[in-house]
Amino acid sequence: MKPLVIKLGGVLFDSLTAMENLFSVLANYQQNFERPLLIVHGGGCLVDDLMTRLHLPVRKKNGLRVTPSDQIDIIVAVLAGIANKKLVAQAAKFKLNPVGLSLCDANLTKATQFDPELGHVAMVVPKNPNLLNNLLAEAFLPIISSIAVDDNGALMNVNADQAATAIAALIDADLVMLSDVDGVLDGDHQLIPELNLTQIEQFIQDNVITDGMIVKLNAASDAARILNHGVDIANGKYPEKLTALLAGEIIGTRINP
């Protein structure tokens, strides 16, 4: 089977139980090494908490964090430091052979500034898969933070969904985006197992899909288009469902290109 990239949302950092459940499932699954796994994460909730404690402003533009020069060090410290090592620690607890990385390590990706008004925010594209291929072949679990470096050596903050898409494209992997929602609901609040890009546009026009789910779906739609195969949105809180997800079943909503 193809490798599977798991993008983790903030829900895992809000709940130690949810994080332990996830790594317990991954440990059970990996006993037979059925499929190479990678994790890509952000950690916006942890960044917001620290910024609040430091009495620093939190500004966003079109859902992306404005990252001025005087804040990038803080964001790097949280994402590549605190968030990454929390995940590495839990993965190590379950003997998953974790390796903590960032997008800039071993030329995994190439980063370019996304919008000058956002400051140190970048888009990334796949570059060199050698390190990940070697780690996966030896049954390590790469845990990759969404921090990159541009060609001038500047540290850059990357949207975690976009980072996960680039990593999945880099190694031709499947992608699942875990969050705190079960998936996409229709007008009767019933879970929709699969959606294509045309259906998504229609649901948005009809106000069936609104607010934060639009952001999630736009990210998943972009990923499905880039990877040219389905991308899953699923809830990361329920370990009994995660096992089925790892085996390729749809437990949330699959976004097809």
Image (tube, helix red, strand yellow):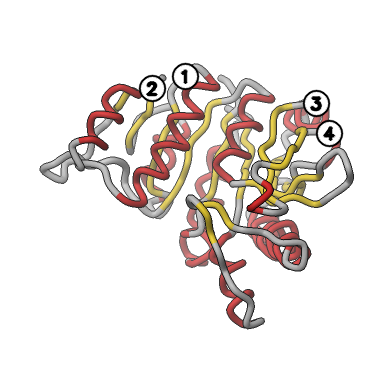
- Asked which secondary structure carries label 2, the reply is strand
Identity of the amino acid at label 4?
Asn
Return the x and y of residue 170 as percentages of the image width and height.
Answer: 69, 25
Q: Earlier in the sequence, mark 1 or mark 3?
A: 3
- Residue at x 33% of width, y 38% of height: 252
Name the residue at the left extreme.
188
Figure check: 35 above or below 31:
above
Q: Is the residue marked by circle 1 packed among few (<14), some (14-19), or many (20+) residues within 10 Å?
A: some
Q: Which residue is mark 3?
A: 128
For label 4, the residue is 107
Q: Neighbour class for label 2 at 10 Å: few (<14), some, many (≥20)?
A: many
The residue at which mark 1 appears reads as 229
> Gap in Å between the C-alphas at discs 3 and 2?
26 Å
Residue at screen point 30% across, 27% down: 195
Identify the element where label 3 is drawn. loop
Q: Position of residue 11 (x, y in %)?
A: 46, 59
Residue drawn at the location 39% of the way across and 54% of the way down? 180
